[in-house]
Image: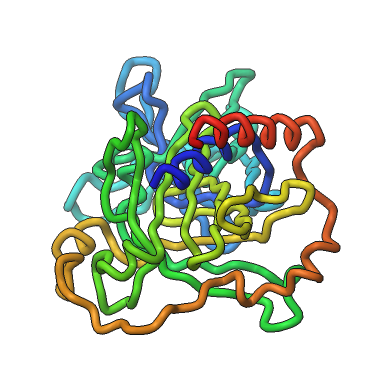
Amino acid sequence: MKKLLTTCALLLTSITSWSFTPESGLYWNSDESGSGYNFEIQDNFFFGVFYVYDDLGYPYWYTTSGFLDGNSYFEGDLYISEDGPCLLCGWQQNHSYESGLGKIKINFLTETTATMSLLGNTLYIERFNFYLGDELQKMRGEWQVIYDVSDFTDGFPYFADVLIFEQTETYDGNYLATGCRSESTNYNRCTNYALNNNELAAVYDTDNDELIAVLRDDANYYLAYYLKTGTNQFDGEAFSYRVGSSPNLSQPGFSVRGFRTASKHFVDTGTGPSKNDSTTTNHTKTGLNQMLTREKSDKTTYAQMTKTQQDRFLRTIEKLEKQLK
């Protein structure tokens, strides 16, 4: 656990960039409770509904629609809709017309945050979290993960994984989400085998909105993750490196995307063996590192981190590792 904690903390010192997919859902600004913005994104088509108020405080709503520019920017006209039916009343055709307020501009910063600009004013908005808790509690559940290792192997270009974030806990003063690589999707929780051989620990950097996680890939290798997280998905990079060493930051990681496939409620209450049950596993399972062609990955040198970031990161690792001895 100490080695996982050390690596998690050190990964916070550096940031890379990657693409992401904005999420549909209900957005708001926490300083403006009572108003909201409902976004639906299908492929690259965007539809937005804004429930706000007029100058007299009466509820009003606007709509907008059109195609995203790239994967994260929208700009379109706002329309007013009036004279529709009341709730559960007989249907009658409403009337929609352009509001005359100009273009609404929505720039997604992450999967679940954005800025919204209109009439020279810009507002920060985020997807509303009704129930999932803080950023680490939100990760609780089962996630299926795809790694693109095409630049790192002569074999099959993708690797799949199933990770379980089982609980949040405080260990040695650090607030963590902990879990495992699932031994089987038939198990809703981490078995003893999974916890002993494929332990997972994660911390969240609130300053940079990043989830940093370390997984014991097998007896000889770790996987370290830089992730941007949404409600039901995450995107980022993963690095494979030998236990007792550090990630080689002069090289890029491989792209990783994850999708929630079971809720925290399922992890808490689902059927199947619990971590207190015995397991019939009697052989050591291989990890992702055995898929990689090390000679090929060693030739990949287009690192996304700057030299300054790399030097700072490695110096910090060296200092903290001396403290652990």
Residue 197: x and y, percent?
A: 39, 66
**Residue shown at the point (33%, 33%) measured from the top left:** 172
| Residue name at image x 68 percent, y 77 percent | 157
Give the residue displayed 44% in from the left and 68% down from the top: 144
Q: Position of residue 188 (x, y in %)?
A: 24, 69
Left or right of 56, for residue 246: right
Q: Above or below — where is 60 with respect to 261?
A: above
Q: Nearer the viewer, residue 37 or 113?
A: 113
- The one of 74 and 91 positioned closer to us in this rendering: 74
164 sits to left or right of 87: right
In screen coordinates, is 256 left or right of 194? right
Q: Is residue 159 above or below residue 263?
A: below
Which quarter of the picture shows residue 131?
A: top left
Q: Nearer the viewer, residue 59 or 20?
A: 20
Find the residue positioned furthest to the front. Answer: 325
The answer to whether residue 204 is above or below residue 229 is: above
Q: Is residue 40 visible?
A: yes
Number of marks present in the image shown: 0
Q: Residue at x 38, y 39 (%)?
A: 135
The one nearer the camera, 252 or 247, is 247
Residue 282 % position (x, y): 33, 84
The colour scheme applied to this rendered structure is: rainbow
Q: Say whether residue 96 is visible.
A: no
Name of the residue lying farthest toward the top: 56
